[in-house]
């Protein structure tokens, strides 16, 4: 077997659908087996929703793309049963250092608080990530989960019919048609589905080029994120260094706009640049070299009837801040429980509009942060450069200037304060971080962690409060998770969920987002919040 990215993990094989007299019908068809499509398939299959994934390719993507995976997406991957293998393979890091010229101006810790299962970040090559997701998907398939991944299946058209959607799919053995109740378009930034439907994708193009060099080396650098502004080895530009598994280091060097892109990637030009950065003693080999430019843009709406866009097909950001694949995973987390309830007829279709509202908010935040980072890293005017350099100078000795330094504000989840799904915030004294619309904060629970006990269904978390084991509101149920502060050895649960309150009751969504909270259990209030959180009145 060759390297992962050289191996056909899901080679084309003829499907019985290709020989069906009338187009076969599926509940959900996902277009694209990138990280977002694979994660969506795992999520739906775990919930028992039948799903077929179509990809024109038959293997993980090769090249240097996503490397940093943030804490919240790792928690989502835990829920999908793929988090531990990611963390086992990845390189864990919490510390970052910022350099200006030839001096370090400060360092920062992205996870200053203890009591969380997952670190602030891991670094892992995207091809490993996709491979681990495929592994998880095949594992579910082997256990009988209703999921199928078809390689060599290129979607050529998507049309709306009375019953749902019809797709035309091209394969090495000709084309066939199939039907779907729902289509999730996870077909990447160039999204053919988006183009087929004539939909918008607007935003800003940044006029800069960055060289990516993945090098295999035994360098003596610690496992930290190092970012340089105006370093001696890349004057007037920026540079970034990250460690990845298998002794691979990722180096990004800003190149400026008017460059010869073909010449920039030639080893005879790349190697001297890297020598200047790493020093003559360090031995390295090039694994991958490319030049990238980027855009920040999004679709106006992510849901178009029975076609739902997720990941890069819906929104695209600059790589600064690690928000691409990370936010795609958050789309999946937000969408799949809603789609499962709607597909099973347990919730109204309008529940899917909350996916649109919540994830458009997420995309807006990401685009804003990513654009700000890009503007700071690559100032567009002399005045902005002077301001940027003054901030960097000040940040060495003065803490107040450090929040102004922006070398990529690394991805954190957004809080859906205005979500139509939120119920009451009726727990006086409780901390704001776990208010309705916020993702649950993790906390140690005996030998495990709180988040391991949440997710995939609605949970009524009670802390020192009484409630029945199960609450129903029509077809939707919530199971109780009863916890006591007497067992909260570190005090983290009480600090993160009660604050000054003596006891509390939380309604938590299947994507581990707080839906509502109260000081005590009251049946009609909880039922009303359950209905509201599932798109009811
Ligand atoms: C230089 C760089 C650095 C990055 N760093 C980070 C980072 O550190 N952290 C982070 O979170 N993100 C990062 N990203 C972004 C990340 O790579 C993307 O956000 C991520 O790949 C998006 O996943 P996706 O599944 O939406 O789309 P893709 O990965 O693009 O997958 C789309 C899939 O759709 C398939 N497809 C396309 N058309 C069709 C069709 N007609 N029929 C069938 N299949 C089709 C393709 O074959 C592909 O498999 C980076 C990106 C770049 C370029």
Image (cartoon, grey):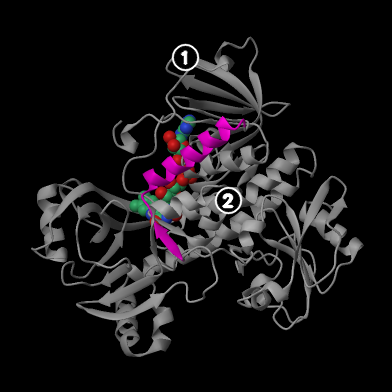
Q: Which residue is under mark 2?
A: 331
Query: Can residue 146 be spotted in the picture?
Result: yes
Q: Are marks 1 and 2 in contact (CB under 8 Å)?
A: no
Residue at position x 70%, y 71% in the image:
435
Q: Around disc 1, counting alpha carbons within 10 Å, would you say few (fewer than 14), some (14 to 19), or many (20 or more)? A: few
- Circle count: 2
Percent position of residue 49, x then y: 67, 35
Secondary structure category for the residue under label 2: helix
Residue 102 appears in which quarter of the rendering?
bottom left
Q: Give the residues drawn in magenta, as a range.
A: 120-144
Look at the image and tell me in which quarter the N terminus lies: top left
Residue 86 located within the stretch drawn in magenta: no
Q: Which residue is under mark 1?
A: 174
Please give left or right for residue 375 compared with residue 104 in the image. right
Percent position of residue 380, x then y: 33, 68
Residue pushed farthest right? 524
Query: Can residue 186 be spotted in the picture?
Result: no
Percent position of residue 254, x then y: 25, 61
């Amino acid at each position: 077997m060759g390297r992962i990215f050289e191996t056909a993990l899901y080679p084309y094989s003829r499907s019985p659908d290709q020989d069906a007299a009338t187009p076969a019908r599926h509940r959900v068809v996902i277009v694209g087996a990138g990280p977002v499509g694979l994660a969506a398939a795992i999520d739906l299959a775990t919930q028992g929703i039948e799903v077929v994934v179509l990809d024109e390719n038959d293997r993980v993507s090769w090249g240097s793309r996503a490397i940093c995976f943030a804490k919240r997406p790792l928690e989502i991957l835990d829920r999908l049963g793929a988090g531990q293998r990611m963390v086992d393979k990845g390189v864990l890091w919490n510390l970052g250092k910022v350099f200006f010229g030839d001096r370090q101006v400060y360092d920062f810790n992205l996870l200053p608080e203890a009591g969380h299962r997952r670190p602030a970040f891991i670094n892992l090559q995207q091809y490993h990530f996709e491979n681990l997701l495929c592994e998880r998907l095949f594992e579910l398939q082997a256990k009988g989960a209703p999921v199928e991944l078809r390689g060599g299946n290129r979607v050529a058209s998507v049309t709306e019919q009375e019953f749902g959607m019809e797709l035309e799919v091209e394969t090495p053995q000709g084309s066939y048609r199939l039907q779907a109740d729902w289509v999730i378009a996870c077909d990447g930034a160039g999204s053919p589905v988006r183009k087929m439907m004539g939909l918008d994708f607007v935003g800003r193009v940044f006029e800069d080029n960055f060289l990516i060099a993945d090098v295999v080396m035994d360098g003596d650098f610690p496992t930290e994120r190092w970012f340089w502004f105006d370093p001696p080895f890349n004057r007037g530009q920026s540079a970034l260094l990250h460690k990845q598994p298998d002794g691979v280091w990722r180096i990004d060097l800003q190149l400026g706009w008017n460059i010869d892109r073909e010449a920039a990637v030639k080893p005879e030009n790349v190697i001297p640049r890297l020598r200047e950065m790493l020093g003559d003693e360090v031995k390295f080999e090039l694994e991958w070299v490319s030049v990238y430019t980027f855009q920040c843009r999004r679709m106006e709406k992510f849901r178009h009837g029975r076609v739902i866009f997720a990941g890069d097909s819906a929104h695209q950001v600059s790589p600064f801040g690690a928000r691409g694949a990370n936010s795609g995973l958050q789309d999946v987390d937000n969408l799949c429980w809603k789609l499962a309830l709607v597909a099973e007829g347990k919730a109204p279709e309008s529940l899917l509009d909350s996916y649109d509202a919540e994830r458009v908010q997420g995309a807006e935040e990401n685009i804003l942060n990513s654009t700000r980072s890009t503007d700071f890293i690559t100032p567009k005017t002399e005045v902005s450069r002077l301001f940027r350099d003054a901030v960097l100078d000040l940040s060495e000795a003065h803490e107040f200037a450090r929040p102004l330094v922006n070398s990529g504000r690394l991805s954190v989840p957004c809080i859906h304060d205005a979500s139509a799904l939120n119920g009451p915030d009726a727990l006086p004294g409780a901390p704001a971080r776990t208010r309705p619309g916020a993702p649950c904060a993790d906390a140690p629970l005996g030998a495990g962690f709180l988040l391991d006990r949440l997710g995939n269904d609605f949970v009524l978390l009670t802390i020192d409060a009484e409630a029945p084991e199960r609450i129903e509101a029509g077809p939707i149920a919530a199971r109780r998770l009863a916890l006591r502060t007497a067992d909260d050895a570190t005090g983290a649960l009480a600090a993160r969920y009660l604050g000054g309150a003596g006891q509390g009751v939380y309604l938590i969504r299947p994507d581990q987002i707080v839906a509502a909270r109260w000081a005590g259990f009251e049946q009609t209030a909880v039922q009303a919040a359950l209905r509201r959180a599932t798109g009811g009145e």
